[in-house]
Amino acid sequence: MKKHKKPPLIHHPWKIITDRFDPEFIPAYESIFSIGNGYMGQRANFEEDYSGPHLQGTYTGGIYYPDKTRVGWWKVGYPEYFAKVPNSPNWIGIHIKAGDEILDLFQGQVSDFRMELDMQRDLLIREFSFRFPSGKILRIQSQRFISMHTKSLGAIRYQITSINFDGEIQVAPYIDGGIKNSDANYGEYFWDIRQIISGPGNDAYLTAETRKTRFGVCTGMLNRFYLNGLSIHPEKSISESGKKIAYNYHFKLHPGDELVLEKYAAVTHTLNIPYDRLHPESRKILEKAAVEGWEKLLNQHVESWKKIWQMSDIQIQGDTAAQQGIRYNILQLNHTYTGHDPRLNIGPKGFTGEKYGGGTYWDTEAFCLPFYLGTKNKNVAKNLLLYRYRHLPKAIENAEKLGFNGGAALYPMVTMNGEESHNEWEITFEEIHRNGAIVYAIYNYVNYTGDESYIRDYGMEVMIAIARFWAQRFSFSQAKKKYVLLGVTGPNEYENNVNNNWYTAYIARWNLEYTLDWIERLRIEHPEHWRRIEQTTGIRPDEIQYWRELTGNIYFPYDEEHQIFLQQDGFLDKEIRPASNIPHEQRPINQHWSWDRILRSCFIKQADVLQGMYFFENHFTRNTLKRHFEFYEPLTVHESSLSPCVHAILASSLDKDDKAYELYLRTARLDLDDYNAEVHEGLHITSMAGTWLAVVQGFGGMRSFDGRLSFRPKLPAAWTSLDFKINYRDRLLRVHINRQKVEIENLSEKPIGFRLFDSEIELAGGKKVEWNFQNREA
Amino acid sequence: MKKHKKPPLIHHPWKIITDRFDPEFIPAYESIFSIGNGYMGQRANFEEDYSGPHLQGTYTGGIYYPDKTRVGWWKVGYPEYFAKVPNSPNWIGIHIKAGDEILDLFQGQVSDFRMELDMQRDLLIREFSFRFPSGKILRIQSQRFISMHTKSLGAIRYQITSINFDGEIQVAPYIDGGIKNSDANYGEYFWDIRQIISGPGNDAYLTAETRKTRFGVCTGMLNRFYLNGLSIHPEKSISESGKKIAYNYHFKLHPGDELVLEKYAAVTHTLNIPYDRLHPESRKILEKAAVEGWEKLLNQHVESWKKIWQMSDIQIQGDTAAQQGIRYNILQLNHTYTGHDPRLNIGPKGFTGEKYGGGTYWDTEAFCLPFYLGTKNKNVAKNLLLYRYRHLPKAIENAEKLGFNGGAALYPMVTMNGEESHNEWEITFEEIHRNGAIVYAIYNYVNYTGDESYIRDYGMEVMIAIARFWAQRFSFSQAKKKYVLLGVTGPNEYENNVNNNWYTAYIARWNLEYTLDWIERLRIEHPEHWRRIEQTTGIRPDEIQYWRELTGNIYFPYDEEHQIFLQQDGFLDKEIRPASNIPHEQRPINQHWSWDRILRSCFIKQADVLQGMYFFENHFTRNTLKRHFEFYEPLTVHESSLSPCVHAILASSLDKDDKAYELYLRTARLDLDDYNAEVHEGLHITSMAGTWLAVVQGFGGMRSFDGRLSFRPKLPAAWTSLDFKINYRDRLLRVHINRQKVEIENLSEKPIGFRLFDSEIELAGGKKVEWNFQNREA
């Protein structure tokens, strides 16, 4: 097991800070201090050369390369490729040479180092003094942001101060298209460089095209210089290899001189703009940026962030680490997805690493959607739903590849364009519960927003296709005289190819029921829409009839003795023992145990039965929830970053306060404290949404089922207060919880109804309600 | 589905013949006409250049390269590499140029083509006329063998007759070390060429070393020429690249001239000889060959084969295709393994292709061992057992990697050196029944040979290590109050990760019981050996005690209604329908159905429950066998080449004669008729042993359980007679069956007892017994 070293970060409510330069932590910093704006993202790589171990990473949303599948033994139905977000041309690079020495933090002496991610302004700041082997000392201060205001714009302000150096310095900002994905199955290079243009001024452009998929990306830079505060216009020489363009500038520096480079970058691509317009468009963006200048661009960016924080900030008093953690999660979720484009989605690592290829998983529907529902205008969440709607034809094709027909859809486990990328049979073909989450997300969207038009305009087609899948996927057991679901993998991926996974069967039945309910409603309330849907989907009465029969006769494994639903058939044939029995040095088990040992054990990776009880909490009594929680949680090793949050929420609602807080802590600062010793690979973006859920649903006690909002808050003992906001049916609520009371304020003009503990409340626009804990205990 | 085209072969009792040259069939011919001698093997590639699609293949037994594992998602316990027999330096090549035109069968006009594998002499013969684009015509006649007498020797006699050509011909025999495996995971080249030596005469040597594993192989050639029957000594020029050496000879040819090249090749390697001795040894072999000459070398080879055929030939009268098929199988099994070296074993494709890497599978113990027991001196089978004995420490390591301890052994699914090569978790970690076959082979060896010393000298250590594995692998189910076997894959690989696979549990229990029985016997009969084994294995009384408890309380899934053992838990939850219902165009299902569809179906790849009933036929009543055969066989798609033979044997013993013959036909000429449209990848060597079993055990009705030999012969309607021989306890029996009678002759001097139908017979040396079918029917 890799020894875990926590990255040396300083606790601060609004800033992520480190003041320790240590090559050992550079790959972790590169992930942690990542920035992005949903359109593109950038690891916190240094602008200068860095020859130490690190992962250079610039990523552009929606672009992908079909990386040839790597598999031991091919099986029919496997996808030919894994669609991966390619590491895109690097626009941050600035090569610095003082005399004949290169500025490379791995090759000299670094002091007074500080790196800071100012979350309020979303600004990456870095400064350090660098002593070259020869003794020359420079002081560097850099700032960087990717504009939340102008999506295709990035900006760097790079200041060099000579401490004791008297001589010529070379500053060479560049664009490098020679970048490779570290996660390439066969070491392939994903790009063709099509064009390198040296602009008329200090601007340059590199247009790269992904091989095979032919996405064009034009990356431009424009450089401006200031010496001791005065704008200067140095001569340049151009270095161009086939894959890189650098502009070389030379300056005479004396001790005390301050040289500033402002480097603006524009990234445009063919998802939005025809190939021929890329270069002109990049140029236009850069020229505009040059006119507006650093301060104005930064201000626009900060203004955009102000609006984000107004909707979504969470305040935790009494625990700076927790405050920092939750803001960091909100920040990074916004770096990854802003909802401006339904062709984009949320990769598990966002734009901060290459693992999982940048594709979309069920994480989006199961964990991320409520965050965006709660903190954004409803169109953002709608775009997440439309992403799947747009992929419906591919999901139908995908199901056909596996032998389904008649319009049945199986959404992929991982995807960029709607096609499956994953190629382990037990996941790709069997972890089909993902289909359930797609429908649950539709339900949740309607639930939060009240926007039922989505169902008739888009959702019903998806729901019908998924219902068709379930109808074909269940089979009738003569032995059980019930419909059974054979050969599935549940959310707990530590069981593969099991029969009658309760969660999958349950969400499948619910999918069918929800679809049947809506068919009835549409028939009656919107017959014209229903007729159109009948046409589009070709749905037949006998299908609907069969779904009714099926939903009424599905087998769910249940144990009378424990009075629990079994995770799957035969679960109690296992040796049942608590995860706490596993020796510490064997954790995580997925790094220490062979796969078959894991499969044969009773240990659960992440919520499975309890995932269902979380989604459908309103279907079960408190006693039932408690019995299942007490049976399954002790068996759970929480080796998915998506596990603790669900359990924390359930624990909190079952008044298991210590457990809830313990589980919350396991995700709250997962990346900042690098619990899993893997932050260098990128951040756990989707699980950040889980942490948000743990705070808002767990401690905030917020729920919404069937369009009824409710709160049952409970403040962790370590906190003095918690403030969060919730966007619900176009109303914005501010919730304040402290040791004494709960205060909920309706920040909108329109009234809203909800339940607070056991009271039904109607809150007019602009009003607030207070609830005193004293009252309750009395 | 690839359209199946049967290779155009001519039926002949002793020869494999084709007279049709068609580039489409060349890759198939290359496999079918392969030769070998257990030490090395060679696909029937042409000596001349051939630029059409084909697979060049020269393989050397026991040498392997660790080809880096290719896997989608790594799991703890996976092997780092797949050990593969590397494609070795090509020694057959002869480059021919007439004037400025290269002789390349893909680039000219081929006529009067004939290729023949003379099975009696094991001689590959090929002849054809070749018209160059310019109109020149040559007649080529080549002969090739790999000596069964001198294992490291190969020989080619290559005759060029000018039909109408008057001019200079260049003949350039070569050794090429620049060969690559077509089945290389990352396209790596497996060799380093260490030395190329041009000998003093017409000899040359190329020494290659496998990368990483550092096996040295020295391939030498020596060339002799005859023009119109007279030995000639032409000048040569040498072409040498870094990986290849060719000797160029030039001749003036006139119409009618006959030029003969005898090319001898010697292959030595560091498994047998120190690196420094390779070249001298190869040279010695070649010099001796040159002295002895073609005729004598061929005679020695043919003499060795005469002995093989004397022990193992099977004669089928009335069906030339069947006669050809069974002899072909015996031939190819002898090409692959001759039992001279316990470090060698039987790859599924022998030396005829690269699929499966040339490693050892359970095929050896389950299917091949009885062939070698029945047709060879017992040392041959003993060497197959010693192979596993030598690998015991690695099998223990392998089990440790998966979390077992205390000397438990899990033999690998595929191996070259005792380490696991396979990397699919459901096979590597779960298809553990292979351990059972290792013990069954020990049982079978003792059963056939009576040589119990093997158990005390070697077998018991293996049996104890395997018993330890089973003891740890079963777990106790509180729900069932029985020991259960969770998470296994049975012989039917169309079910993965199932619970309580009956076959695996049954053979495991039998392993434990057999081991316990022998422990008792050794304790009493050979206490000094037992003390040594106690020391070596550290076996404790409580282990033995636990094995007893375990064997008495193992769970076997059983269905009362059908009165059958279930293949695994929940088997009857599947939709049960006969394989004959599957539309023809969807067969084989593994090429048409997604894996999950296969897994969810009731269809069985190869004998599973029935494999157990075959191994332990003596444990079950005829009615039980019948019930299980009638339940399971109709569900079986026989998509493993190892499937039909077992079913044919059972069908024959259940008097399902048509079924038996139908199933026999599916393997009898599997490769000759290329049933599976994949013969170009290599031959199905291990399933050839299965065909032998189908003939000898199926139609011959031969059985041996617990040291009791018996016969219950039954001649297929299409045959007029069947003759085979069986080596049993150092006696050789000849069995003749025709429509009227069965005749069994003891060809040895010592007496032998056996059962023929229901009569117990004691047959003195040199005597024979006759049994008339008329008698029986009466």
Image (cartoon, coloured by chain):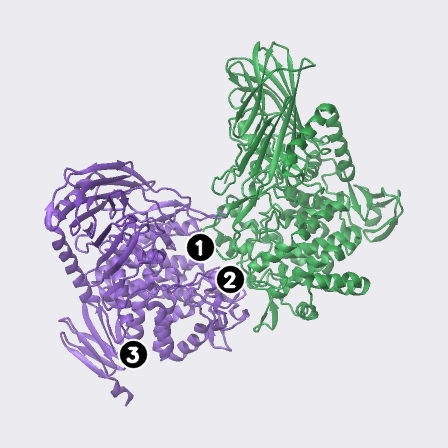
Chain colours: A green, B purple
Number of other residues with Cα within 10 Å of mark 3, as a class: few under 14, some 14 to 19, many 20 or more:
many
Place residue A553 in its image quadrant.
bottom right
Nearer to us in this view, A10 or A158? A158
**Residue A264 screen position, x and y as percent:** 66, 26
Which one is earlier in the sequence, the residue at label 3 or at label 2?
Answer: 2
Question: CA gap, disc 3 to disc 2?
Answer: 38 Å
Report whether A656 appears left or right of A179: right
Q: Chain of mark 1?
A: B
Mark 1 or 3, which is nearer the eye? Answer: 3
The residue that appears at 63% across and 15% down in the rendered structure is A234
Q: Mark number for residue B593?
A: 2
Which one is earlier in the sequence, the residue at label 1 or at label 2?
Answer: 1
Q: Are marks 1 and 3 in contact (CB under 8 Å)?
A: no
Mark 3 or 2, which is nearer the eye? Answer: 2
Q: State the residue lying farthest toward the bottom.
A: B778
Question: CA gap, disc 1 to disc 2?
Answer: 24 Å
Amino acid type, residue under disc 1 in the picture: Phe
Looking at the rendered structure, the secondary structure element under dot 2 is loop
Q: Mark number for residue B540?
A: none
Q: Mark number for residue B714?
A: 3
For residue B531, above or below residue B254 = below
Which one is earlier in the sequence, the residue at label 1 or at label 3?
Answer: 1
For residue B354, above or below residue B239 = below
Looking at the rendered structure, the secondary structure element under dot 1 is loop
Discs 1, 2: same chain: yes
The residue that appears at 55% across and 38% down in the rendered structure is A677
For residue B240, above or below residue B641 = above
Nearer to us in this view, B516 or B412? B412
* Residue receiving disc 1: B429
Amino acid type, residue under disc 2 in the picture: Trp
Nearer to us in this view, A646 or A634? A646
